[in-house]
Image: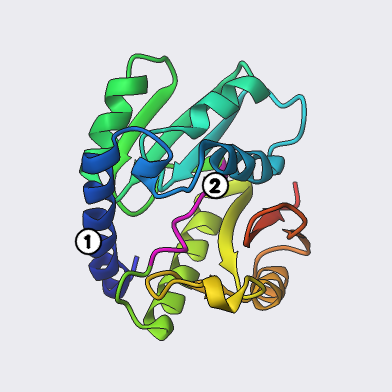
Amino acid sequence: MKPTSTQISSKIAQYYDDKLTVYGCSHLGVDWNSEQSQQLRFQQLLKIVPEGSNNFSICDLGCGYGAILNYLDLKSADFRYEGVDVSETMINAARALHGHRKGISFFAGLEPTQMHDYVVASGIMNVKTDEPDISWKEHLYDVIGVMNDYSSRGFAFNCLSTYSDVKKRRPHLFYADPLELFDFCKKIYSTNVALLHDYSLYEFTMIIRKEP
């Protein structure tokens, strides 16, 4: 990860440390409006994993307190999971909740510690705090590159969309152009890319599948 991303990540860690301190291990603790929207995001992201899959590994980049594990449990009974987050406070909370489980591990950092079948990221492209759009966009592309480098079968991420209502946008959040990112991922990472923008949130999910 580039030095710029390292500097940005320290600010993001502080932002989420503060959220967790106030709201605890809840959707508000990771800055989502509702538990329902949080679950809907997980549902979209985990479309990267084919139905009926077992014995796969997955990294949750920006894992927070590990909330996606509850949804993964519904999808499969046999998987290995690594949660990575820039916030050590989040990682400690995740370990307290899920650290006793076999095949589950959590690490503080910017990148996965090993290769995985799949890498997913929920919400980590959104909160830019006071970072200028141009440097945040560079950071976003760096993160996508990391997800590609550490996944063998594919990766998925979500972003707030430029198609969202302009009047409702917030200055500390970043709104990405879904068509621009689709074009980039299609040309650079895989010919098998899906853009999901048909669910009831002001965001989109990108699914990038790799050739076997």
The one of 118 and 115 positioned closer to us in this rendering: 118
- CB within 8 Å, label 1 to label 2: no
Q: Which residue is mark 1?
A: 10
What is the secondary structure assignment of the residue under circle 1? helix
What is the secondary structure assignment of the residue under circle 2? strand
Rounded to the nearest angstrom, the CA distance separating label 1 from label 2 is 21 Å
Question: Is disc 2 surrounded by few (<14), some (14 to 19) or many (20+) residues within 10 Å?
Answer: many
Q: Name the residue: 44% across, 57% down.
A: 124
* Left or right for 59, reference 42: left
Q: From the viewer's perspective, is residue 202 above or below residue 75?
A: below
Quadrant of residue 148 in the image? bottom right
Q: Name the residue: 60% across, 45% down.
A: 41
> In this picture, which residue range is highlighted in magenta?
118-127
In the rendered image, residue 73 lying in the magenta stretch gets the answer no
Considering only order in the chain, which callout, 2 or 1, is on the residue closer to the N terminus? 1
* Left or right for 176, reference 19: right
Give x and y (percent) for residue 207. Answer: 69, 54
Q: Which residue is mark 2?
A: 120
**Callout 1, which amino acid?**
Ser
In the rendered image, residue 122 lying in the magenta stretch gets the answer yes
Q: From the viewer's perspective, is residue 142 above or below residue 211?
A: below
